[in-house]
Image (spheres, rainbow, N blue to C red):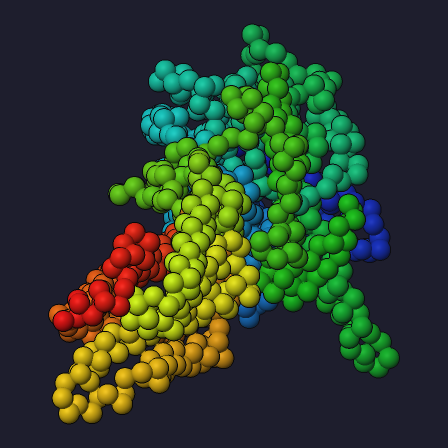
């Protein structure tokens, strides 16, 4: 194995980068020690330093394509071996920079068969051409899966008001332009969207500090408790400056700690001069990472690395000096005041902020990347062995593998790595894997832990892919281990609904009380809603209470009063009937058509008693009888009055000489009027009961807090038709009585009938608008009162004068007095 290392400039951090190199070295060691994988083949690797910049990436790509000491592509006369793969990353800018040189070069040299592909372990950027895309294989899952996972985390914890920091490059622009709108569609709002200062390794550090100072002020003044950081592996170095910048600007980060959400491309690293800086601001952060497992033997492999024994490993010595802040002795250097490295320093003693002994997700990806190349080479060798050409019974010499031949095998490769996990790629060359969600827990000794608290299952439906253990998450200290709230304003309380603030984001709103009759039983509801039909809102309008079923009952005061009146009037009618029966042979009873009088009194008695059908719980039978019985009885009563007035008119017309009306006066006429008028009403009632009969029903909408048990009329047309017919009879009776009011009559019955009909019509004319404007059980009260008032009006106006004469002025109840009054 040949390893050529170059050390970066003094600002370039090596402590975390070296773990990736160790993961690569371990993979090479394991592959070379596994003869079943690549027999008679020894893998090696070269390390090219890109300095996270396009210039150094271009130079590294040119060095890869050139001979030693030159930058002339395709001229490698002194090269011993040809590289088969380039593992680059995780910085997305470097992918495109590499593609600019390597992919174009491969296309130009296609005829020579000297092609290269790039095997990446970072997220896939947007390629400039389809040709470049063909040579990329991403040891990283589909990036959309990660963004869906972040969105699911925000929705899971109800973090609808967040801040966003993104990189100042094309990747950041694409994130802001393509991903954030997807978040907005799910209700996420942004207090700020700022560009993250890029880590700088030159004299532009001062500008980075100034930009960072401005951004930390915006972040700390923000009302959002959650900040999404879309960065890459170097972004943490800039983030680590935040506490110092905040202290310089007199901003307290402890009282305004944020929950940082970091994407999988980020990892913990730092400048050498940042050692000892506070990292508690990262306490409680959440980060995504490509799903990984701890590889067996990785920690032991690290512990075996010793800079004294492996002096040719330049990266190890550089890492050792940076990690332990010491220098190895050198005859040309005078380090009297510096600490010298002995090689006996213990890596276990380093805090994780300096170096992590357990394998990170990025190192795991590097390890898998090299294994992917090895398995692709193995698959290609097996394929060629099976299909080699035979000539004269002797196999041709096995051709040396070329880089361009690996692409087909990489796209279709599938294997289990040393941790026992399956590694495979989809049709786009992206790794088929999920993401883990880690919670960062920091300690006073500058160390920290990544605690796995959730994961994204790539095979699950989009809305079900995230599983997270809420109880396992440690939040920043200022939240006292309660779930942080990240909203533009407080949630609306129960009984209130949200209303949009003009000119503000959709996450910013006011809270208004629910309209009458509606509730909100959850916080922060968009709109209040009505209770079920059998319930009503409580006083706070945050819940529903069962409605009380009501009807005009005998037990309530109103029911008792109406029942008492009905029975009293019934008794009074019966008393009047008894008086007329007892005095049936007196002139005043005979003169007023005794049979019609009895019929009218019995009808009025039944009218008073039918009121009892309207009081009490509506039943099927009472609903059928209540309106029809009332209509029939009242029709008989009004028909009797019409017959009485008609007979009076005809009687006086018959007294004229030569009048032919004499034969119409008598019982047949009165009976015909009563029967014919009543038969019409009976026909209407029969049609009503046959087509759409009344039935018991519940009115759940009219009253806010009660359910009204009532009799549904079935057909309002038939109901008002019956009332209209009674009104028609009353009007005809009133007109006839009014015309007969001046006829000579001993007892002025026509005048009394006229007045009684006036009362009757007034009551029922006022009934219609009153009934239609009344709600609940009071509709029944209005009808009962109308029945009682109109019936009592007939009883009082027609029979009070007669009873007065019969009981108090019997001297007037004589035939002589009657004849005298008629003269």
Q: Say left or right for 485 vs 28.
A: left
Q: Residue at x 55, y 61 (%)?
A: 619
Write down the quadrant of residue 405 in the picture.
bottom right
Residue that lies at the very extreme toward the right in this rendered image:
393
The residue shown at (65%, 51%) is 457
Q: Residue 717: percent from the left, percent from the top?
A: 36, 74
Q: Position of residue 463 (x, y in %)?
A: 58, 53
Q: Is residue 436 above or below residue 573?
A: above
Q: Residue placed at 17% from the left, 66% from the top?
A: 821
Q: Quadrant of the C terminus?
A: bottom left
As drawn, 366 above or below 397: above
Q: Is residue 594 above or below residue 13?
A: below
Q: Measured from the top left, where is residue 234 in percent x and y?
A: 50, 35
Residue depicted at x 35% and y 39%: 512
Q: Is residue 375 visible?
A: yes
Asked whether 759 or 656 is in front, the reply is 656
Image quadrant containing the N terminus: top right
Report the residue that reaches farthest toward the front.
816
- Above or below, 270 relative to 567: above
């Amino acid at each position: 194995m040949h390893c050529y290392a170059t050390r970066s400039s003094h600002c370039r951090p090596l402590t975390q980068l070296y773990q990736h190199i160790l993961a690569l070295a371990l993979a090479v060691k394991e592959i070379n020690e596994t003869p079943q994988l690549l027999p008679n083949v020894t893998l090696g690797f070269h390390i090219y330093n890109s300095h996270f910049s396009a210039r150094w990436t271009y130079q590294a790509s040119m060095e890869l394509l050139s001979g030693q000491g030159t930058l002339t592509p395709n001229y490698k006369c002194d090269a011993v071996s040809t590289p088969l793969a380039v593992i680059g990353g995780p910085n997305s800018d470097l992918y495109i920079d590499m593609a600019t040189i390597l992919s174009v070069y491969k296309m130009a040299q296609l005829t020579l068969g000297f092609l290269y592909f790039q095997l990446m372990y970072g997220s896939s950027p947007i390629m400039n051409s389809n040709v470049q895309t063909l040579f990329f294989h991403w040891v990283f899952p589909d990036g959309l899966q990660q963004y869906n996972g972040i969105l699911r985390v925000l929705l899971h914890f109800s973090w609808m008001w967040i801040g966003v920091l993104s990189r100042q490059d094309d990747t950041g622009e694409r994130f802001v332009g393509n991903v954030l709108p997807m978040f907005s569609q799910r209700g996420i709002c942004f207090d700020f969207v700022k560009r993250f200062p890029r880590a700088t390794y030159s004299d532009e550090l001062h500008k980075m500090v100034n930009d960072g100072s401005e951004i930390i002020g915006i972040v700390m003044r923000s009302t959002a408790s959650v900040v999404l950081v879309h960065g890459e592996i170097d972004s943490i170095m800039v983030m680590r400056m935040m506490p110092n910048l905040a202290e310089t600007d007199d901003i307290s980060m402890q009282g305004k700690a944020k929950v940082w959400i970091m994407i999988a491309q980020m990892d913990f690293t730092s400048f050498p001069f940042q050692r000892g800086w506070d990292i508690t601001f990262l306490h409680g952060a959440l980060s995504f990472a490509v799903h990984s497992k701890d590889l067996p033997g990785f920690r032991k492999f690290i512990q075996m690395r010793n800079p004294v024994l492996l002096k040719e490993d330049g990266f190890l010595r550089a890492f050792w000096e940076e990690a332990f802040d010491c220098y190895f002795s050198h005859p040309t250097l005078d380090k009297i005041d510096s600490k010298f490295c002995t090689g006996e320093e213990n890596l276990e003693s380093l805090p994780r902020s300096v170096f992590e002994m357990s394998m990170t997700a990025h190192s795991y990806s590097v390890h898998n990347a090299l294994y992917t190349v090895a398995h692709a080479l193995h698959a290609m060798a097996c394929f060629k062995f099976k299909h080699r050409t035979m000539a004269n019974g002797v196999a041709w010499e096995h051709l040396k593998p070329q880089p361009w031949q690996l692409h087909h095998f990489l796209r279709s490769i599938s294997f289990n790595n040393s941790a026992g996990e399956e590694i495979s790629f989809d049709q786009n060359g992206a790794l088929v894997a999920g993401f883990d969600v880690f919670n960062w827990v920091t300690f006073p000794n500058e160390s920290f832990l990544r605690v796995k608290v959730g994961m994204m299952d790539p095979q699950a439906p989009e809305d079900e892919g995230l599983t997270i253990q809420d109880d396992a998450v440690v939040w920043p200290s200022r939240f006292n281990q309660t779930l942080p709230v990240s909203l533009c304003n407080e949630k609306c309380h129960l009984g209130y609904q949200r209303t949009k603030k003009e000119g503000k984001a959709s996450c910013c709103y006011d809270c208004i009380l629910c309209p009458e009759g509606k509730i909100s039983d959850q916080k922060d509801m968009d709109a209040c809603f009505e209770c079920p039909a059998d319930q009503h809102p409580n006083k706070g309008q945050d819940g529903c209470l069962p409605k009380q079923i009501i009807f005009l009952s005998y037990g309530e005061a109103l029911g008792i009063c109406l029942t008492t009146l009905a029975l009293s009037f019934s008794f009074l009618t019966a008393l009047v009937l008894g008086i007329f029966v007892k005095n049936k042979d007196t002139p005043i009873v005979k003169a007023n058509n005794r049979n019609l009088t009895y019929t009218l009194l019995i009808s009025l008695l039944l009218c008073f008693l039918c009121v009892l059908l309207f009081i009490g719980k509506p039943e099927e039978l009472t609903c059928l009888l209540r309106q029809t019985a009332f209509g029939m009885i009242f029709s008989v009563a009004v028909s009797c009055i019409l017959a009485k007035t008609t007979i009076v008119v005809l009687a006086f017309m018959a007294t004229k000489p030569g009048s032919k009306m004499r034969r119409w006066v008598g019982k047949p006429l009165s009976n015909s009027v009563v029967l014919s008028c009543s038969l019409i009403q009976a026909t209407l009632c029969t049609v009503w009961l046959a087509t759409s009969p009344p039935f018991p029903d519940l009115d759940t909408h009219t009253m806010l807090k009660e359910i009204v048990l009532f009799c549904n009329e079935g057909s309002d047309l038939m109901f008002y038709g019956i009332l209209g017919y009674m009104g028609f009879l009353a009007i005809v009776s009133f007109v006839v009585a009014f015309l007969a009011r001046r006829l000579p009559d001993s007892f002025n019955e026509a005048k009394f009938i006229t007045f009684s009909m006036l009362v009757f019509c007034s009551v029922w004319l006022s009934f219609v608008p009153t009934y239609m404007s009344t709600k609940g059980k009071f509709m029944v009260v209005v009808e009962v009162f109308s029945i009682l008032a109109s019936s009592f009006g007939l009883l009082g106006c027609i029979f009070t004068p007669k009873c007065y004469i019969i009981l108090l002025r019997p001297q007037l109840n004589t035939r002589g007095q009657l004849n005298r009054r008629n003269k």
